[in-house]
Image (cartoon, helix red, strand yellow):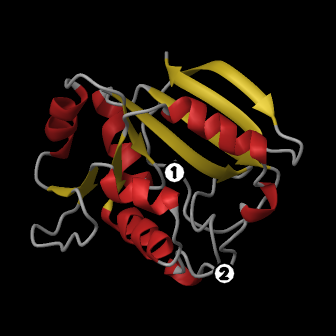
Amino acid sequence: MRVLVVNHLTLDGVLQGPGNPQEDTRDGFAHGGWALAGNDPAMGAAIGARMGDGFAWLFGRRSYEGMLSHWNSVGGPFKDGLNGTPKYVVSSHPDAELPWPNSTLLTGDVPSQVATLRARPGGNLVIMGSGALIRSLLPHELIDEMLLMIHPIVLGSGRRLFGPDDDVHRLRLVDSAATDSGVLLATYRPD
């Protein structure tokens, strides 16, 4: 399996709360839902093309809980598909509850466990959100590709994908396109 990151970012690198105002209000974050204005068919097509068929999810616990909360409030075939998709959830809490069907808890040596998953045949292991998880996998060379949807907005505050204490990681741009709403769809691979 390939490990694929698919994330919305602001121009200043904020990853927090793209989907709705209540999604992630940690640290008093009040700009939730900032990515909604940029959603358009081109973005959905790009995400679908990168994720492909036969994928599994890899989430940090907070991102898992946010996705579960959102998709439990929405019905339809997409939700049904998500219920059937394998979900691997990283948590430092060994007793974390995982109520979503087909969910498996990963604790302890997460890079080693992700390396084992990555060695399996199959499609993509897709990470959405989960900034801390992404930062923990990059030094172990466990990220194969990142589709970053960079929105034309600067928030000034909020949790960022990368911070001042992160190591240097060189990436190579392999594809890019802009949507009609001005979102840059940039696909990177480790250099």
Q: Are marks 2 and 1 in contact (CB under 8 Å)?
A: no
Q: Nearer the viewer, residue 32 or 158?
A: 32
Q: Nearer the viewer, residue 11 or 76?
A: 76
Q: Residues within 10 Å of mark 2 (few under 14, many from 20)?
A: some
Amino acid type, label 1? Gly
| Vertical arrangement, residue 130 with respect to residue 2, above or below | below
Provide the residue designation for mark 1: 163
Q: What residue is shown at x 50% (from left), y 73% (from top)?
A: 70
The picture quadrant where one finds residue 29 is bottom right
Q: What residue is shown at x 63% (from left), y 57% (from top)?
A: 14
Q: Estimate the x, y position of residue 108 in percent, counting from the top left.
A: 10, 52
| Vertical arrangement, residue 24 with respect to residue 117, above or below | below
Q: Residues within 10 Å of mark 1 (few under 14, many from 20)?
A: few
Question: Earlier along the polypeptide chain: callout 2 or callout 1?
Answer: 2
Q: Estimate the x, y position of residue 105 in percent, counting from the top left.
A: 16, 58
Q: Nearer the viewer, residue 163 or 130?
A: 130
Q: CA distance from mark 2 to mark 1?
A: 20 Å
| Vertical arrangement, residue 131 with respect to residue 134, above or below | below
Secondary structure, mark 2, is loop
Marker disc for residue 30: 2
Secondary structure, mark 1, is loop
Q: Which dot, 2 or 1, sits closer to the camera?
A: 2
Q: What residue is shown at x 18% (from left), y 74% (from top)?
A: 97
Amino acid type, label 2? Ala
